[in-house]
């Protein structure tokens, strides 16, 4: 008894000191080298995964099959606060939290390379969230226990903040010390080539300024002209994850989600909106996107059609995917086409033609096609500003499918291109490529423009703004 | 122990009678049971002080005055009797035993034996005979419905599956609600390591061989369990096992053979057959085709230019006929013996159980060896026990399919239209039923899952203890106990690889052009080790202070060290089909390992003060130091006190029908620390959840670590339970009627909750101490003995339990805690509501109360989920009836749970495929949602004229297309009434038994779960089954799990 009491009094503290997890390292032991690639994978996993499914259905590249069910709520615009919580959660508590810690650790040891890489990727990830939700927490976000109820900031404030963060990171010396060979491997985008990071940062800035042209035209113009004045270089290569291992849990996230992990791999069928445009234009990319020169499409959102009503739907073409498909954050084509738009807007179109054509060609290169296979009509570029903008944006739209589908949806909201159709795609007067209102849409003819604030925010944060309908445009929308 | 107490009482009741006496009455007191004299029986003259007691030969002699009218006889363990004093000077008395009388000694906290009468809290004891009446394979198989406040359910229909035991309802929102299991003084691991929603390899308490159990003592309240401190908050089940007794070698044999089959299966609609959208489509998995017409139709794939024919009509008992009758064998032999100094006990038990699926891929084998011994030397005594349990469980995947890897039997069998004979599909390699040509590409042949996929869990477990005792003086003794429980298990889970051949029926060659995804197959090897070491040192004292006061109690310390280590390695995509080895793949294996280790120190003391043998006050206290709490804040004290007043001993009730009255009151505090590793923040190996699938590091040879989504805290304390319990026990008419009523009111506060936080904080949850739940309840046990004669005994036990739980507080800013989900249905804790309500979308109504529908005629669903009710039953009743006529006895137990709801994933799938009986509304003709309106853009409402067409009937019942109505068909009434157990047994007469040289022998036939009545709106599944574990989350319901089992068996028990 006595010995036990002695044990209790003196041995207790040490004996009970066994509460450090053997399973997971302490947070203090992490480094930018392990955090940064994790966060990039998180961004790619979600933006290139379920958000590409969302973006692709809403951009009308593909639609829900009538023999299965998986994406009906997306295709009918019936999303609620309970949908897409996973992406919101992962992008914040997965990607952004890791970027933020990587930035903090990098800054603490003046490692401006990881500081830039993580800052640019943080800005990219934030931009996607802002564009989807209009408002999200920013100034009070990512503070852990110090702020459990962060307030929401308006989209413009966040954009301004992100642009400033990118500028601050660009202002540091991140080029004089190259990454070590091991560190280079942690950069899935550019293998440690810091000059490409500069270009990515500039191109991302260009993209964000272009998003502002409706809501903040003066600020957009000032930002873009400053880029040009400063002689900024933009991306001429694709930024993103060019490939994947292709093994389970190490594959293109869209493939992993939609093909490997679903018992029905034929949920996403060709949408007539996209196939009609491709085939009308004799666009050879139809083979890349649908695996056939003559896809059998479904009309967008027509998943309740019966076999009697639409006998061809049973054999409607499935969107072609592989486990090694890339996930692009910003593609070369997108970069060129954005430059074309900027030159049209602010420099009277000087040099815009070349950029437009570069963009169209790059879009073909992106899917492994020779630039010679670009239909001649695509390269024609003339008319009013609106006509040229339509060409730019429609070409962009045709380049996003699968690899960064969400952008097609965003750009349509920003510019109104591709145009929306007044008739359904079954109508004789339907113009190929025009977006149609989903057959089973539940929003009274209004297209979706955003996601509603997720339950994981609404249920947990009293600062979540009142719910805004899915059909209300975001702050930069047209 | 009974005899020991008797001897003690002989001394206690010694008294002097100083009154003048007229004459002396003598007599002998004997026992009705064995006709032997009873020593130490108190003999008193009613209304007078003093008295005498019987001697060692049961004889007494008492002087009585002429005014004395009645003599009272009472003794521990016997029902008291009164006898009028007549002219005779001899009064011989026969006392009946009464197991519930004053002298009953039961096991209480820390294994201390105490007389029931001194307990100020509710306690129930179950004896071996009750535990084993129907030869269950697990400890609680035969106890359902027998004890008030104890809810026991078999969550699995598969052999070896988990048993859920919950005492006094759920109170911990996100922590454990599992009671502590203590075997012979040592805590026993009851984890479910290795199991998940798809594989249930059982909880570890099921490893105990019920045949070895002497008794189970159930301590429900905090005052009863306060000596277990931070492990006592969910109640404690103390199992005492059999041991050797002095005397010649005794051999007990028991053997039982039980047949098992499925107890209840879903009732399906019988009017519409295969097809979809009202059309007959032979490749569909649904029952949305035309009405049955009985005509012969070809079905399935055309193979080698031939096709099968069958009538287009509903097949009755299709599911039941597809399942088989399983067998369960339960054999046990026990040898015991010893002399006055040493005893020994050995037993071997063997269980083999094969479930109701064809093949033995759903089976459970268990071998139990037990060796116990004890010895005495002077003031020292020692005893030890050693148990080995070896078991092998084979389990068929339940729940949802592992998409892309392999399918699930229980999902596949639900997707067979009612006109397709399931049983015939068993020949799963037959050209019509194989991977290429199974009739639908939307599901797989369920038999493929049974024969080609599988799992095996094999464990070797050793547990036991060593006890050393030293009796220092007559009133003081010391006890040291060391216990250990070590379990080593390996598991293997596999799915075979398959893919429809290119061009085959299921690769797009069917009329719909649909193809089924390939199954890549997988192998997962697991290793699970759990360990628990427990040491305690106690000083026990027991002292008569003076003629009025006595004191007993203990002081002690306890050290507990437990943990687990789980290592799993798996591959996906088999290279060689049918070969299950983790190198059989082009993919590299992925591994995870998880360790958990915790320690707990406790120091405790307990004292019971007795006054005049009718008033007992017990005070206990325990201080715990836990390794899982923040180090500067890891010491907590748990006090308790209880009062027992035996009114019938203190006050003379002899002129009333009351034969016994005891009043109890207690207050106790217990606690619950938390899981290890919740103090320091950590990073985790990055595995990005994609929604379906993950993106897991290493990627391109680069490792990745990510901030854990859980924000830990160094500022929390244990959960604390404060409980008041009041109770009374009253018996009438010489104990022919007994009522034991208990009221409790407990508050569980400072709950440790991983509080979900806005992910924009950078985390998704935060460990906080907040939230409380109040449970109030009434437990009533009524015992009636309508007939009690030498030849006939009739004993009725009725139990009633009503438990109200209410969430009284949640962390600020959090209006609910989500406990479980299925699609849009959520199982939540919400302030002001019972712990566990199910919420889901529902219809919305116009101001005039009409259903609002959308442009397509479907009801518009509510943006906020609404409550469909609580999972807590309104009340639970049990009725156990035992009837004995001479050597025959017949008993049965009914268990009625009334009220509550549950979510059924089986119902979800049955609605999807149009098999649910509720999908035949309006004969599936087009209909307009009754009393419905459409809302115009200007906010006004017009009458809805858009019908739900025949082709869209299926969408009307599915949750993605009609959220507003779907959940009403999936959230079902939880009520049930079950005939839990029935046994008929016969004690063979001595003449026959003697011929085989045995002492006793009995044969029984029995059944369990014989009849189940479900609520009217539940045609689907027994609400007790679940594949969500065995804690609060499982109350949500089930997701396509195995229906429960019915048992019929016969047993033979022989003692030599």
Image (spheres, rainbow, N blue to C red):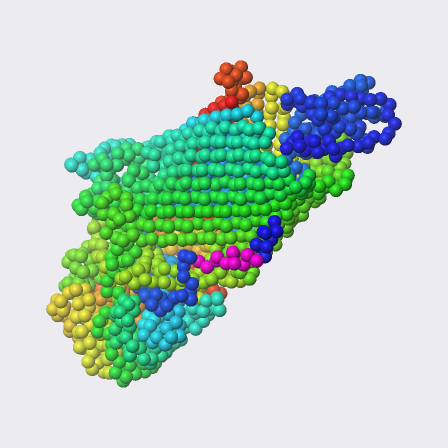
Q: Which residue lies furthest to the right in this view?
A: B20
Q: Position of residue A40 (x, y in %)?
A: 32, 66
Closer-to-camera residue (A239/B123): B123
Q: Position of residue B499 (x, y in %)?
A: 23, 45
Closer-to-camera residue (B444/B89): B89
Closer-to-camera residue (A241/B947): A241
Identity of the residue drawn at 37% across and 68% down: A31
Tell me if residue A418 can be seen: no
Compared with A330, B95 (above or below) is: above
Specify the quadrant of the image occupied by residue B494. top left
Q: Which residue lies furthest to the front in this view?
A: B378
Identity of the residue drawn at 72% across and 33% down: B9
Identity of the residue drawn at 55% across and 56% down: A12
Residue stretch rendered in magenta on the structure? A10-21
Identity of the residue drawn at 28% across and 44% down: B580
Looking at the rendering, in which quadrant would you find the N terminus of chain B?
A: top right
């Amino acid at each position: 008894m006595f010995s036990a009491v002695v044990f209790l009094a003196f041995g207790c503290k040490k004996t009970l000191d066994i509460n450090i997890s053997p399973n997971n390292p302490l947070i203090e032991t992490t480094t930018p080298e392990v955090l940064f690639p994790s966060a990039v994978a998180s961004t790619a996993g979600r933006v290139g995964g379920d958000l590409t499914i969302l973006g692709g259905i809403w951009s009308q590249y593909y639609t829900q099959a009538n023999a299965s069910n998986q994406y009906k709520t997306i295709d009918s615009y019936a999303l609620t606060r309970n949908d897409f919580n996973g992406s919101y959660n992962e992008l914040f508590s997965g990607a952004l939290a890791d970027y933020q810690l990587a930035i903090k650790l990098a800054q603490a040891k003046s490692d401006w390379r990881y500081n830039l890489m993580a800052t640019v990727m943080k800005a990219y990830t934030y931009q996607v969230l802002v564009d989807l939700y209009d408002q999200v927490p920013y100034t009070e976000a990512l503070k852990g226990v110090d702020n459990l109820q962060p307030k929401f900031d308006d989209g413009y404030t966040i954009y301004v903040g992100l642009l400033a963060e990118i500028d601050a990171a660009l202002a540091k010396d991140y080029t004089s010390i190259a990454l070590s060979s091991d560190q280079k491997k942690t950069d899935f985008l550019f293998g440690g080539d810091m000059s490409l990071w500069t270009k990515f940062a500039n191109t991302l800035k260009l993209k964000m300024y272009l998003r502002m042209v409706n809501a903040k035209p003066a600020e957009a113009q000032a930002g873009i002209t400053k880029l040009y004045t400063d002689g900024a270089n933009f991306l001429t290569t694709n930024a993103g994850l060019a490939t994947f291992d292709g093994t389970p849990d190490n594959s293109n996230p869209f493939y992993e989600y939609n093909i490997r992990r679903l018992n029905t791999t034929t949920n996403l069928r060709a949408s007539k909106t996209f196939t009609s445009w491709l085939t009308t234009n004799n666009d050879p990319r139809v083979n890349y996107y649908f695996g056939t020169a003559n896809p059998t499409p479904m009309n967008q959102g027509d998943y309740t059609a019966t076999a009697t009503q639409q006998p061809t739907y049973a054999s409607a073409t499935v969107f072609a995917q592989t486990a090694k498909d890339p996930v692009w954050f910003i593609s070369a084509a997108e970069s060129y086409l954005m430059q074309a738009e900027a030159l049209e807007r602010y420099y009277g179109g000087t040099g815009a033609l070349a950029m437009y054509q570069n963009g169209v060609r790059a879009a073909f290169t992106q899917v492994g096609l020779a630039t010679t296979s670009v239909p001649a009509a695509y390269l024609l570029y003339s008319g009013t500003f609106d006509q040229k903008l339509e060409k730019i944006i429609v070409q962009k739209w045709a380049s996003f499918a699968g690899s960064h589908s969400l952008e097609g949806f965003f750009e349509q909201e920003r510019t109104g291109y591709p145009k929306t159709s007044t008739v359904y795609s079954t109508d004789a007067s339907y113009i190929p490529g025009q977006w149609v209102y989903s057959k089973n849409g539940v929003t009274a003819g209004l297209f979706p423009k955003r996601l509603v604030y997720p339950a994981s925010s609404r249920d947990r944060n009293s600062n979540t703004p009142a719910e805004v309908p899915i059909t209300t445009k975001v702050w930069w929308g047209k | 122990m009974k005899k020991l107490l008797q001897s003690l009482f002989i001394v206690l009741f010694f008294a002097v009678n100083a009154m003048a006496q007229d004459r002396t009455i003598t007599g002998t007191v004997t026992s009705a049971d064995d006709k032997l004299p009873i020593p130490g029986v108190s003999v008193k003259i009613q209304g007078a002080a003093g008295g005498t007691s019987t001697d060692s030969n049961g004889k007494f002699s008492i002087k009585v005055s002429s005014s004395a009218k009645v003599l009272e006889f009472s003794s521990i363990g016997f029902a008291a009797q009164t006898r009028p004093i007549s002219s005779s000077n001899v009064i011989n008395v026969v006392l009946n035993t009464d197991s519930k009388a004053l002298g009953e000694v039961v096991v209480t906290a820390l294994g201390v034996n105490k007389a029931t009468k001194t307990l100020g809290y509710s306690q129930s004891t179950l004896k071996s005979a009750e535990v084993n009446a129907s030869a269950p394979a697990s400890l609680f198989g035969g106890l359902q419905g027998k004890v008030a406040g104890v809810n026991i359910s078999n969550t699995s229909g598969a052999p070896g599956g988990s048993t859920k035991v919950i005492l006094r309802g759920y109170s911990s929102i996100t922590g454990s609600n599992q009671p502590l299991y203590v075997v012979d003084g040592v805590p026993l691991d009851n984890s479910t390591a290795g199991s998940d929603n798809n594989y249930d390899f059982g909880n570890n308490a099921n490893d105990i061989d019920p045949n070895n159990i002497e008794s189970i003592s159930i301590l429900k309240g905090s005052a009863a369990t306060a000596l277990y401190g931070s492990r006592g908050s969910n109640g404690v089940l103390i199992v005492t096992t059999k041991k050797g007794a002095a005397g010649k070698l005794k051999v007990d044999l028991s053997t039982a053979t039980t047949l098992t089959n499925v107890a209840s299966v879903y009732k399906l609609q019988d009017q519409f057959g295969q097809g979809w959208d009202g059309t007959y489509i032979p490749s569909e998995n649904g029952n949305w085709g035309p009405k049955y017409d009985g005509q012969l139709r070809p079905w399935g794939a055309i193979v080698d230019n031939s096709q099968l024919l069958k009538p287009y009509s509903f097949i009755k008992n299709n599911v039941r006929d597809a399942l088989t009758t399983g067998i369960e064998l339960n054999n046990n032999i026990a040898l015991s013996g010893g002399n006055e100094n040493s005893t020994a006990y050995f037993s071997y038990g063997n269980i083999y159980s094969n479930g109701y699926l064809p093949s033995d891929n759903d089976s459970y084998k268990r071998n139990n060896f037990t060796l116990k011994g004890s010895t005495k030397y002077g003031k020292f005594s020692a005893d030890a026990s050693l148990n080995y349990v070896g078991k092998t469980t084979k389990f068929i995947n339940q729940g949802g399919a592992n998409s892309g890897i392999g399918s699930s039997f229980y999902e596949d069998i639900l997707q067979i239209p009612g006109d397709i004979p399931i049983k015939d599909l068993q020949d799963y390699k037959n050209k019509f039923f194989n991977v290429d040509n199974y009739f639908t590409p939307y599901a797989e042949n369920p038999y493929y899952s049974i024969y080609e996929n599988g799992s095996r869990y094999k464990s070797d477990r050793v547990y036991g203890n060593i006890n050393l005792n030293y009796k220092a003086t007559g009133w003081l003794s010391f006890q040291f106990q060391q216990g250990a429980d070590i379990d080593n298990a390996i598991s293997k889970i596999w799915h075979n690889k398959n893919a429809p051949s290119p061009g085959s029926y299921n690769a797009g060659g069917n009329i719909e052009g649909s193809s089924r995804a390939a199954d890549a197959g997988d192998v997962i090897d697991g290793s699970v080790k759990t360990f628990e070491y427990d040491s305690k040192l106690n000083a026990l004292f027991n002292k008569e202070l003076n003629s009025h006061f006595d004191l007993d109690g203990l002081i002690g310390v306890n050290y507990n060290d437990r943990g687990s280590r789980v290592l799993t390695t798996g591959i996906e995509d088999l290279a060689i089909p049918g070969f299950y080895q983790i190198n059989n793949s082009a993919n590299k294996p992925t591994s995870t390992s998880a360790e958990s280790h915790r320690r707990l120190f406790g120091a405790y003391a307990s004292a019971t003060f007795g006054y005049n043998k009718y008033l007992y006050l017990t005070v206990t206290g325990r201080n715990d130091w836990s390794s899982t709490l923040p180090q500067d804040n890891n010491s907590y004290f748990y006090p308790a006190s209880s009062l027992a007043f035996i009114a019938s001993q203190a006050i003379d009730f002899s002129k009333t029908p009351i034969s016994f009255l005891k009043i109890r009151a207690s207050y106790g505090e217990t606690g619950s620390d938390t899981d290890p590793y919740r103090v320091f923040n950590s990073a985790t190996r990055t595995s990005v959840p994609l929604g379906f699938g993950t993106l897991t590091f290493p990627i391109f040879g680069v490792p990745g670590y990510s901030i854990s989504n859980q924000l830990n805290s160094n500022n929390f304390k244990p959960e604390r339970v404060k409980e008041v319990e009041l109770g009374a026990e009253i018996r009438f008419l010489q104990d022919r009627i007994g009522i034991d009523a208990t009221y409790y009111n407990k508050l569980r506060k400072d709950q440790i909750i991983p509080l979900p936080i806005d992910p924009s904080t950078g985390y998704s949850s935060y460990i906080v101490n907040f939230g409380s739940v109040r449970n109030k309840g009434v437990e009533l046990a009524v015992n009636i003995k309508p007939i009690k004669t030498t030849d006939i005994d009739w004993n009725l036990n009725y139990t009633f339990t009503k438990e109200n739980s209410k969430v009284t507080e949640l962390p600020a800013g959090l209006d609910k805690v989500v406990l479980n989900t299925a699609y849009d249905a959520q199982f939540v804790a919400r302030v002001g509501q019972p712990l566990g309500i199910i919420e889901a979308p529902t219809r919305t109504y116009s101001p005039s109360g009409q259903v609002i529908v959308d442009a397509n005629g479907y009801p518009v669903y509510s943006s906020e989920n609404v409550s469909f009710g609580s999972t807590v039953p309104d009340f639970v009743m049990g009725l156990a009836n035992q009837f004995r006529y001479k050597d025959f006895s017949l008993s049965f137990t009914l268990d009625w749970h009334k009220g509550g709801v549950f979510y059924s994933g089986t119902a979800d799938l049955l609605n999807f495929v149009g098999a649910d009986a509720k999908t035949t509304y309006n004969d599936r003709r087009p209909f307009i949602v009754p009393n419905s309106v459409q809302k115009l853009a200007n906010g006004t409402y017009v009458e809805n004229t858009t019908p739900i067409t025949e082709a869209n009937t299926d969408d009307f019942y599915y949750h993605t297309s009609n959220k507003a109505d779907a959940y009403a068909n999936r959230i079902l009434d939880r009520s049930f009434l079950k005939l839990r157990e029935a046994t008929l047994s016969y004690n063979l007469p001595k003449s026959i038994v003697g011929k085989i040289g045995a002492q006793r022998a009995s044969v029984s036939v029995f059944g369990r779960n014989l009849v189940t009545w479900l609520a009217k709106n539940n045609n689907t599944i027994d609400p007790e089954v679940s594949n969500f574990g065995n804690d609060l989350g499982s109350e949500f319901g089930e997701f396509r799990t195995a229906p429960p089992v019915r048992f019929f068996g016969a047993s033979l028990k022989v003692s030599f």
